[in-house]
Image: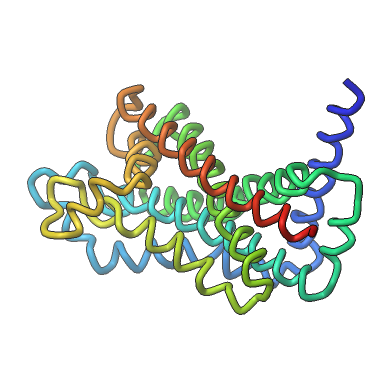
Amino acid sequence: MRRGSARLTQVALLARRGLNEIIRVPGAAIPGIVAPTIFVLGTTAVFGKLAVLPGFTASSYLTFALPVGMLQGAGFTGAATGVNLARDIEQGWFDRLLVSPAPRAVLLAGMVASAAVRVLLPTTFLLAVGFALGAGWPGVDGLVLAVALTACFAATAASWGIALALRFRTQAAAPLMQAGMFVAVLFTTAYAPQRLLTGWIQDVARINPVTRVMNAVRQGFVGDVTWHTTWPALVALAGLLAVLLALALRALRRAGR
């Protein structure tokens, strides 16, 4: 019992350290907070007229695009977690963690948990701007579900970033951390509903597991929240998390040798 409590305390302290960076270096966090909103506003300006097409599922393109920005914000947050770890590796601070008595799984959990909490910043900013500009209200249940799934996706993105940081051990790997999640989100139903996509992008979106997450985050914005749309997202997130956490933990254990 005491050991379990101690492990939770260690996870909380590591997560808090990740959050403290926002207070100590707020300028470094601003791009990750603002970028998803700029992306959504730019996409709406370019593709906004798609909302008048027959079969489009949202009342406005801004409403349709908000969930895309939420997942992009999660991707940026996860990449930032990986970059921060790479910086700690370069500066030698991470070596101190490796010689601490904390298990490798606890170290990983602390970093992933910090990403799941940090993503609330870009999500809140994006939603505030979106609702102020007239985006549709998803309902309390839709909003809570969307935020929860976004936090889980941020944990997934953080696992990806951590695995790459431990593999390359340099901040120069940051573009790869960002690009992986950016592409995973865009090759979904990011720009249009599945039925309106054509060619290869329709096929990629159909098999991309992140599409299930996108649809579940979006469901409250474009219709009713249903278990039929929610459970595939939970399965997809569980699978992605299992694979990426395993890769990150394997790399973390190797780093201590």
Residue at 58%, 63% (x, y): give it.
79
Is 215 displayed left or right of 83 in the figure?
left
Is 194 displayed left or right of 123 in the figure?
left
Q: Does residue 112 sit above or below 191 in this rendering?
A: above
- Quadrant location, the N terminus: top right
Q: Position of residue 124 (x, y in %)?
A: 56, 49
- Quadrant location, the C terminus: bottom right
Residue at 58%, 57% (x, y): give it.
78
Q: Nearer the viewer, residue 64 or 243?
A: 243
Count how many numbered circles sit on residues in the image: 0
Q: Does residue 244 sit above or below 72 in this rendering?
A: above
Is 105 displayed left or right of 99 in the figure?
left
- Furthest residue toward front: 257
The answer to which image quadrant residue 139 occupies is top left
Q: Position of residue 98 (x, y in %)?
A: 84, 56
Q: Does residue 48 sit above or below 54 in this rendering?
A: below
Colouring of the image: rainbow
Residue at 73%, 52% (x, y): give it.
253
Q: Position of residue 229 (x, y in %)?
A: 32, 29
The answer to which image quadrant residue 169 occupies is bottom right
Residue at 55%, 56% (x, y): give it.
160
Q: Position of residue 107 (x, y in %)?
A: 77, 48
